[in-house]
Image (cartoon, grey):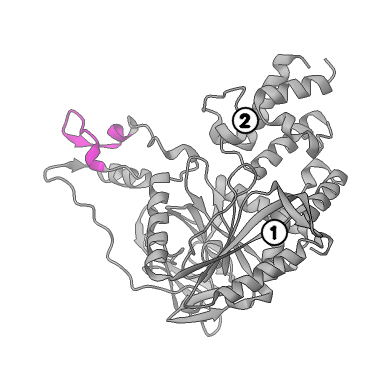
Amino acid sequence: MNQDQITELVKRTLYEVAPDLATEPLDPKARFSVQFEFDSMDFLKFVTGLHMATGLALPEKDYPHLASLELAVKYLAEKLPA
Amino acid sequence: MTAFRMPSLGADMDEGTLTEWLKQPGDNLKRGDIIAVVETQKGAIEIEVFHDGVLETIHVKTGTRVPVGQVLATIRTAKEPESIQAVVPQPAPKPPVIIPEAPGLKVTPAARIRARERGVDIQSISPGQDGIIGLKELEGLSQPAQSRSGHGINLDEMRKAIAAAMARSKREIPHYYVGSIIDMTAMVEWLATENARRAVADRILAAVPIIKACALGLKQVPELNGHFLNDHLMRIAEVKLGIGIAMRGGGLIAPALSIPDTLSLAQTMQQLSDLVARVRGGRLRSSELTNATATLSNLGDGSADMVLPVIYPPQVAIIGVGQIEDRPWVVNGALAVRKLATFTVAGDHRANDGRSAARFLRYLAEIFQKPETL
């Protein structure tokens, strides 16, 4: 997957977890917890969605690498074959 | 025959708009069946029946705004009807709220209903060229700016509901507050090991062992678990723990999670996940809004260290939990870095004392050292 496809995947997963955010502006650098008031349940559903889409294990210790759009895209780009 | 009335859905709600009948005259009803959907300040709520029987007559059309206590339907009960009053306290019916309009303002009935549904003040709308406010004039309006939560929940209305309940709480309930810092290291480490073994979808949030521990604690200290009604504490044997769930954009709801003290952590996680999903996007059930016997306000990661919460009437206690953070702590006479959280209990002094809350907190402090027993 290339960078654009991964970005699309992350956004799609985000909006599946929180459809009400689909029309909100998305700051790629801001943490979901800050810009969207994501709580631990939202975040777990987001991670679960990424896991379903990619098959990656996404262990809890890597959660900080998934905290914003930019971080998540970078992390997934390293893990997924190009 | 039993009159099925508009139930009170908490201390903060005195009316709702009937949006859907899910049962029709002649349908068989079982206790717990969902009979109708009512739009409230807390979103769409599924209304459950408390009797077995047959739906005889429907008295209220969809789209009608109904005060709490008004008869919605008549039910022919199978056996001696159990009084609905035993389940939900019924205040006297109030007259419907009539919003005065400016003299000479012409509004079509459909526009009036739509405006009510949307929580729009009809007087804030400019009439069309014919001087009449119709659906067309309403269509031009964007949703109120605060309604970011979507899903039909008007956050302004929800704020009013919170204001009503919390003002009543502060007016009527003599709160006391007791707190303890609890070492959560063993629990956090145990949960990390447990979650490392689990697939992503089966992982358990830290809130779950906290919910279970609180439910077990309430069983140990039953004077914190119940309702204050008619100047008395009515203890309730089962624990139904209200869980404070925040809405994006503001506001919160605390629906009840049933008997988490008897469930495994995996089961509790599933229930919590379902409850959050229905708070955010779907529908809560009427019983979930009225049954809670105590409430948990868990601030969660990246929030704040301590909360002194306000009791949700008619409950008699609310538990507050701050974020879990690395802090210096004394272990066996030496300083160590541990994962700590501040737990607080706000109690109703008419129903219980700080000593009960302290006993509850000591129980929590102990059980979090043995997380595998949860």
On the image, the x and y values in percent for residue B216 come to 71, 69
Spot the residue most to the bottom: B80
Residue annotated with mark 2:
A31
Label 1 neighbour load within 10 Å: few <14, some 14-19, many 20+? many
Q: Nearer the viewer, residue B79 or B321?
A: B321
Q: Can see residue B225?
A: no
Q: How many marks?
A: 2
> Could you tell me the amino acid type at mark 2?
Arg
| Residue B102 in which image quadrant | top left
Residue B193 sits above or below residue B350 on the image? above
Q: Secondary structure at mark 2?
A: loop
What residue lies at 81% left-to-right and 20% top-to-bottom?
A: A78
Spot the residue most to the right: B197
What residue lies at 56% left-to-right and 32% top-to-bottom?
A: A35
Q: Nearer the viewer, residue B100 or B17?
A: B100
Q: Contact (CB < 8 A) between labels 2 and 1?
A: no
Residue B156 sits above or below residue B27 on the image? above
Q: Can see residue B287?
A: yes
Label 2 neighbour load within 10 Å: few <14, some 14-19, many 20+? some
Residue B129 inside the magenta-drawn segment: yes
Q: Which mark is residue B182?
A: 1
| Residue B131 in which image quadrant | top left
Magenta span covers which residues? B122-138
* Quadrant of the rendering where the C terminus of chain A is positioned: top right
